Amino acid sequence: MKKELAKTLYQIADGIEQGHYGKRIRIALTTIGSELGAEELVRGAELAGKRLPQLEIVLLGPRVETELELIETDCLATAHQIMEEKLDTNEIDGAVTLHYTFPLGIATVGRIVSPATGKEMLLATTTGTSDTDRVSALLKNTIYGIATARALQIEEPSVGILNIEGANLAERNLKKLYEQGYRINFAESAREDGGVTMRGNDLLQGTPDIMVVDSLTGNLLMKVFSAFATGGGYEATGYGYGPGLGPGYQRNIAIISRASGAPVVANAIEYIAQLSRHQVNKLLQDELERAEKAGLNEIVADLKQSRPAQESVVKAPPTKSVGEEIPGIDILEIEEAKESLWQVGIYAETGMGCTGPVILVAEEDLTLARESLANNGYK
């Protein structure tokens, strides 16, 4: 996988230099909110620019000394607004940012370097949530990972499932999908007894091209793999937490963390540039279509039958702009928590931050919303 990715990256650089790909790739980087300072993020952007000289990088953040294009702002919300507008109008092809909240159903596919072999491996997924049902999420995470691998020009990526809660049930249902016509190249554990279920050894060795995990486990693994050699305060290796993917989602936004150092920032920019070039969102929609033809929706419906969702009878208050996050609510209770706020007249939405689900409310409602959630046992 490592050689294939390196070759593809070289081809992208060579193609851009020779003008074979038409318009150049423009990637935005927000530089607000890092624990390491804006200068560290800018250093990563400059490093990416040196690797791919014709890559156009646009910085969104405070004034810094750089030759890169800069749109100056000291407000992260403003930076995100500019980033989204430029993505939606195709002024940029992709973006790298932090502190970004994805809607439910959107999850990110991270990319790491295994310490034992130097082999690159995708972690599907690392932030966000593809589904509120755990096993259903693992099935969808597999599909998100396959689409990402194919955008990296790996046509038959191998898939393993980390030995976590729900892994066996996920394996059975993925094999059912396979039997019903959805193509999956199952990996074999490097341990003597083999199998699709991956052990810790397989994590260290990078056995599969795609390691399927739930997002919170994936988030933890990303931090360990990227910062294990630095004591945890500086993420020095890997490609960040990856792009947010999901049904119908079109924005190419990749996530880094507050501790991501310049090498990771540079890799994240190259990662999203590559995925943007090869239309990862279109590839995901194609994969979802194939999986749905093989019965994905029916399998997910069967999995959720044991926990049927109660139809909401609570009407939402008038819509308003929401920008304040309230974290710390379990994913299984997030919708109920939102509706508890609706019942007292507070408009709220749900989303996923880097560390889990969040309730989104307007700034003027934040204090009352916190009190209401606490009174109802959600905080």
Image (tube, rainbow, N blue to C red):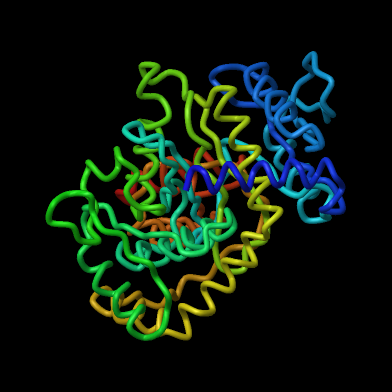
Residue 37 is drawn in which quadrant? top right
Asked whether residue 345 appears in the rendered view, the answer is no
Side (left or right) of 25 relative to 247: right
Q: Is residue 339 shown above or below 238?
A: below
Q: Is residue 177 shown above or below 228?
A: below
Side (left or right) of 365 relative to 133: right
Residue 28 percent coordinates (x, y): 74, 38
Asked whether 129 or 69 is in front, the reply is 69
Q: Residue at x 83, y 46 (%)?
A: 24
Residue 255 percent coordinates (x, y): 56, 40
Asked whether 338 or 83 is in front, the reply is 83
Residue 223 is drawn in which quadrant? top left
Side (left or right) of 227 relative to 253: left
How many badges with numbers are in the image? Answer: 0
Quadrant (top left/top right/bottom left/bottom right) for the C terminus: top left
Asked whether residue 106 appears in the rendered view, the answer is yes
Q: Residue at x 42, y 60 (%)?
A: 141
Q: Residue at x 35, y 80 (%)?
A: 301
Residue 71 percent coordinates (x, y): 83, 30
Q: Residue at x 13, y 52 (%)?
A: 192
Going by the picture, which residue comes out furthest to the top? 65
Residue 99 percent coordinates (x, y): 56, 37
